[in-house]
Image (cartoon, rainbow, N blue to C red):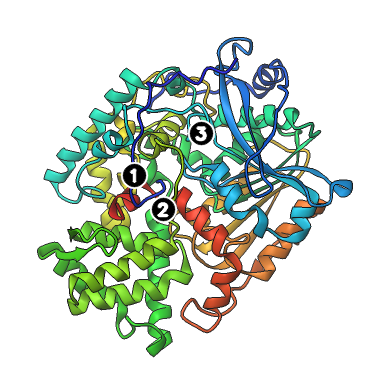
Amino acid sequence: MINQNLPRGRVRAVLATIVTAALSVTLFAPPAHATKAASASAAAPVVSWSACRDGFQCATVPAPLDYDRPAGVQIGISVIRLPAGDPARRIGSLLLNPGGPGGSGVDFARAIAKGLPLEVRARFDIVGFDPRGIHRSTALRCFDTYEEAIASWPPFPYPETPAQERVQREADSRLAAACARHGGAILNHMSSADAARDMDLLRRAFGDEKLSYLGYSYGSLLGQNYANLFPSRFRALVIDAVVDPIAWATGRGGEARTTPVGTRIGSADGAAQTLGEFFRLCDAAGPDCAFSGDASERFAALAERLRANPVTITDPVTGETFTFTYNDLIAVTLSALYSPPIWPDLALFLADLEALVPPAALGERLAAIRTKLGLSGVAQEEYPNDVEGSPGVTCSDTINPRSFTAWESAADRNERRYGYFGRIWNWAWSACRAWPRTAGQDRHLGPWTARTSSPVLVVGNYFDPATRYQGAVTAAGLLPNSRLLSYAGWGHGAYFIAGNFCVDSAVTRYLLTGRVPPAGTVCQPEGSPFGPTSAAMLRAAQQTRAGLNAATLPPAVRQAFR
């Protein structure tokens, strides 16, 4: 029987305009053979599928709360599938994860499954799952209502000033304390390693001899956990928009004591490089970019003006007015960098901010960005755990400084080195400073160098504002049987997101046949986000891109669009 009552009871809450956004007990994970034995000792559950609209089937699969006690308390893993279109030629199940951490694989699969390449849809059951602790699976919920959870956020996307840093510290401590009091047993069992064990349990429950997997962003960490814990149990494993697993888990040298995970993974570097491309391509586009003509200098002047004089914006849906600050500018800019087809909309918004157009007009521009990012209100469960889900996973996986001074110093260093985005990424998971030390009991902190029986395909963008290209290079270098596929373009993620034929055909071929592209393959972008191809790019991958954005945008960005 599935225990769905591990967290505190929930009460109906209203989802507003967003769909959602070190703790060391030991520095060593269990050896891979012990992990495999623990997972294999959990009996493969019987899956009872039921129709859940539009040709999809849904189920809740029981899994051990603690794989060291496979016959003990069970949790529920929410799954959805679109059955293969050609059952006679079915290869098996293709598991998807959109990232986050905290993104719903169920929502992602429903959003993109029917738009995937026909060959993929024909040969695979397309399967999404909400990882343990997230959304419709047995979830970490630390408050009575979603409204209470949202109210726990500080009144800004991320801290810029010492005064704001103090407010952030208090908010983080309150969230961690609420989760310690009310989060339930799932709090201690939300690591990516445990989610990878769930993936292996799902593989067996679905009757697949070997796993096929496609993971984006944080989903690349799930894939790397699986590859290292179960190196002989997959036939195809794609990780796209890849996080450096060492930087994520522990950092190098003494970084775990001095440098938060959001700074260690180098996202501010990737964002700075991507913003530089936005400026370059905007200026090159001339009249096709509303912010062209010394775009970099104009942005810097606009940012300084907003530091001193925030503006007022009117929400076109609610009619309410709110103050738009420098912090909000950085968060909104970062969000738009995820999705190059939105860059013309960002340019229009920046030009209107510069021109001080009326608040209602600014609200319309901001609403257009929000909608294209996939952050408009969509009906879902009554208490999506956007607030606690992401830190629940991150703080279980990673070792971070316990000293608040270390977080402040890292923010200063990151801003000096990478500019605008240094602080927003440094503070991304600042609740980890105070997170309960019991979390992440069975996490995997390395090594990340297992020789897998099948090759891993690693996909990286040159200009990714969240997972810089170096993460893909590092992951490919760590895994001896892997192949790096590079995309010399922009945005967060590439496969069926960038609208690039070279990337899409190479990954699809690998998923179907296991054949990796030639070593050194670099796919070139087709045109510019400001050029005539941008509309085609948007149409080709709109659903996948929106679904990925809804899962992967960091909490600070979601807060700016609240």
The quadrant holding residue 372 is bottom left
Residue type, label 1: Ala
Question: Is residue 295 toward the left or the right of residue 234 in the image?
Answer: left
User: In front here: 256 or 7?
Assistant: 7
The quarter of the displayed image where residue 326 is located: bottom left
Which residue is most to the bottom? 287
- Mark number for residue 267? 2
Q: Please, is residue 357 above or below residue 377 in the view?
A: below
At label 3, the amino acid type is Arg
Q: Residue at x 25, y 77 (%)?
A: 352
User: How far across and how far down the image is residue 482, in percent?
Assistant: 70, 48
Compared with residue 349, is residue 388 higher up or lower down, i.e. above or below?
above
For the question of whether residue 401 can be seen, the reply is: no
Tag 2's secondary structure?
helix
**In this rendering, which labeled residue sits more in front, label 1 or label 2?**
1
The residues bearing labels 1 and 2 have C-alpha atoms spaced at a distance of 10 Å
Is mark 1 in CB contact (under 8 Å) with mark 2?
Answer: yes
**Total numbered badges shown on the rendered structure:** 3
Compare marks 1 and 3 and give the one earlier in the sequence: 3
Upstream in sequence: badge 1 or badge 2: 2
Disc assigned to residue 136: 3
Q: Which mark is residue 468?
A: none
Which numbered disc flags the more N-terminal residue, 3 or 2? 3
Percent across and percent down for residue 430 are 30, 38
